[in-house]
Image (tube, rainbow, N blue to C red):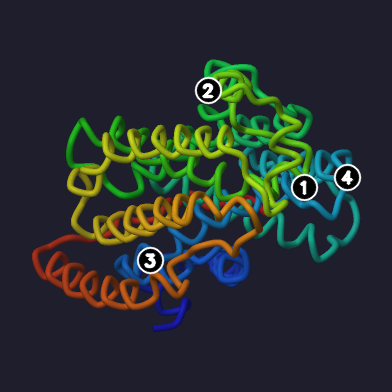
Amino acid sequence: MTIVQELDLAGITDSGLRADYITTSQLFRKIGRGRYLGRFMFPAAKRSYFDAFITFVAYVDNLADDINHSVEVRARRLDEWERTYMAIAKGDPLPVDRPLSLSEQTDASLARALVHTLRTWDLPYLRVPDFVDGHRKALTTYEYANDEALDEFLETVTLLPAGWINQIFEPQSAEAEELCRHTITAFQLLDFLWDLREDLDLGRLYLPMEHLARFGLEREDLNRQIGSGHISDPVRELMRFEIGLAKKHLDAGRSWPQTLHPTSRTFMEADIQLHDSMFPELAKNGYAFFKSSRRGLGLTSGLMITRTAAAIARARKINQQSIRGGYRVRAPFQNGITE
């Protein structure tokens, strides 16, 4: 099924908005970090919304983390995207009085698709700047003294969009939001460990300094050892501790998929399975993972591709059963987006 057919099923008929969703879905395929196949675990009428939301999170994250650009350039790009987004969200003219560059066209297409997605799902679309601002602050925050300091980052960059995706996944229980918070916190803590070398190269460390001090370590110890081929016992102990924290959160949120609509469960079960596979990879052979850089894991990685194919097949049956039983993806927001 093509993206055009998916938009037909979603009831999205405006030609300009359809073009924005198509652009966003194509962008998702490029930057989705191995999650693109996850879209096929949802009913066809929901896929464009999933694409827009996940692309938004990944796109802003990429703007903030692009190691090829200075902090000043990255901050400017975040500002530019936010201005474009807010102009579209408020129905104002775009903040450019000339033909848009290719990157500006991409910014605008993603912004229009995201505004429409958030409004369709009755989400606070004017709070998107809070998420962008969390990334902006992180550009010049090079370390976090303690858990409380890191929590501010987690609340805006991690848990704010987590609450939104929980709503798009159609929770069936009041417990869903808290379970979601635990699950997505675990994902983020695992990502901090998986990307430790990359973050250190960017001058950032997301492991609180009080955690390092607990094992008699300083930041310079990590700078020297991570990726060097030599890992000391105190660093191994630190990694064991950090992995344990992530596992504690994941275990606390593991039942989140069961609180969601059946059409959303398979994707989240697969995503949890993906992150579960990170634990042994991080810890095996005496935490050898941290001696050298590794490729990221995703739904298309060697560890997951067979499971992903099986999950897509299973989701297709569940979605067909749900639709036969009367389930419909909610109707799209219809008041239009000012271009």
Q: What amino acid does circle 1 point to? A: Leu
Given contact means CB atoms under 8 Å apart, are the residues at marks 1 and 2 in contact?
no
In the structure shown, which secondary structural element does the residue marked by tag 2 occupy? helix
In the structure shown, which secondary structural element does the residue marked by tag 1 occupy? loop
Q: What amino acid does circle 3 point to? A: Gly
Does 177 sit left or right of 127 as displayed?
left
Given contact means CB atoms under 8 Å apart, are the residues at marks 2 and 3 in contact?
no
Q: Nearer the viewer, mark 1 or mark 2?
A: 2
Quadrant location, the C terminus: bottom right
In the structure shown, which secondary structural element does the residue marked by tag 4 occupy? loop
Identify the residue shown where x is 77% and y is 47%.
94
Q: Nearer the viewer, residue 13 or 309?
A: 309
- In three-dimensional space, the C-alpha distance between marks 1 and 4, rounded to whole angstroms, equals 26 Å
Q: Nearer the viewer, residue 40 or 2?
A: 40
Q: Nearer the viewer, residue 325 or 255?
A: 255
- In three-dimensional space, the C-alpha distance between marks 1 and 2, rounded to whole angstroms, equals 34 Å
User: Vertical placement of 56 versus 23: above or below?
Assistant: above
Q: Nearer the viewer, mark 3 or mark 4?
A: 4
Given contact means CB atoms under 8 Å apart, are the residues at marks 1 and 4 in contact?
no
Given contact means CB atoms under 8 Å apart, are the residues at marks 1 and 3 in contact?
no
Does 138 sit left or right of 172 as displayed?
right
Which residue, given by chain and number where applicable, does mark 4 sit on? Answer: 70
